[in-house]
Image (cartoon, rainbow, N blue to C red):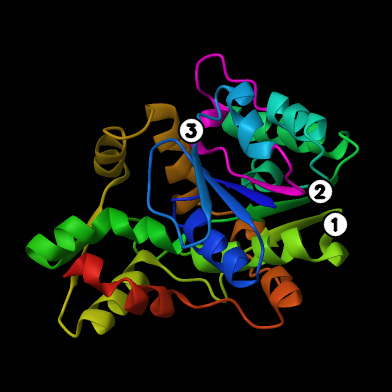
Amino acid sequence: MIVVTGATGNIGRPLTQALAEAGEQVTAVSRHTAAVPDGVRHMVADLSEPAGLRPALDGAKALFLLLSGDLHATGAAPADIIGEAASAGVRRVVLLSTLGVVTRPFGQTRMAMRALEDTLRESGLEWAILRPGGFASNALWWAESVRARQVVAAPFGDIGVPVIDPADIAAVAAACLLEDRHAGGAYELTGPEVITPRGQTEAIAAALGTPVRFHQLTREEAKAAMSRSMPAELADDTLDILGSPSPAESRVSPDVERILGRAPRPFADWAARHVAAFR
């Protein structure tokens, strides 16, 4: 049995589906009750309280660990989840980390994630670590303005990074959970090409079949908008990456193709599959 945390999100949902289609018994864990594929067991748990994960881990051979906001929840002890997994007899953990632990290692979030990576390496369990860069699905931030005004408003319109389709992250995670050859690997996951916000706007317009205008925000305007849904420090951090990506953050990694035997999906493919969100 394989346990998938964050099972109702844009990585966990396709991962759960892929594992179920591969014939695996799957326990999907999320913070709230949610629909899951037929044959998949669903359990509600809050990862900021690791002991609450024990019933889900009972009898599991592998765990996909996606922490999201639980990494910094009050009183959170994410390393304890690794301990709970080991105590339950889990043999393999695949951790969703971030490319930032390599490219910008000194921010609070990335230091915490690096510490969790180290805990996993030292746990005695089999492990694999996934380090994606920017997500194609972050374009959903623009969905409301595209629906209402046919406009994408974003900073740094002509500066790009190789964003990755979350479905490709899920496919890599499935391979790491199912195949022994990926044990001990730390993989940097990107899309197949650098794409700018202006280029993403063009791809969304092509998927819709209607014009979409790009409006460039100043950094200050973007920070004000982002700070409504995240701490100001994290907004600044994100804008630093978007506005001045390092060579490592701009590099197209070969790891997705090495693992899956195919190139990662371009942003245009993601936009076409999610076009309903922008209508």
The tag earlier along the polypeptide, 2 or 3, is 3
**In this view of the protein, which residue sits in the foreground, 136 or 89?**
89
Q: Quadrant of residue 214?
A: bottom left
Question: What is the three-letter code of the residue carrying label 3?
Answer: Gly
Q: Residue at x 44, y 51 (%)?
A: 9
**In the image, farthest residue toward the front:** 39
* Residue 248 forms part of the magenta stretch: no
Crowd around label 1: few <14 · some 14–19 · many ≥20 (10 Å): some
Q: Which residue is denoted by mark 1 in the rendering?
A: 183
Q: Which residue is denoted by mark 2 in the rendering?
A: 127
Crowd around label 2: few <14 · some 14–19 · many ≥20 (10 Å): many
**Which segment did they paint magenta?**
58-78
**In this view of the protein, which residue sits in the foreground, 217 or 24?**
24
Q: Which SS does the magenta portion mostly show?
A: loop
The tag earlier along the polypeptide, 2 or 1, is 2
Q: How many marks?
A: 3
Element at label 3: helix
Q: Which residue is denoted by mark 3 in the rendering?
A: 69
Crowd around label 3: few <14 · some 14–19 · many ≥20 (10 Å): few
Question: What is the three-letter code of the residue carrying label 2?
Answer: Trp
The tag earlier along the polypeptide, 3 or 1, is 3
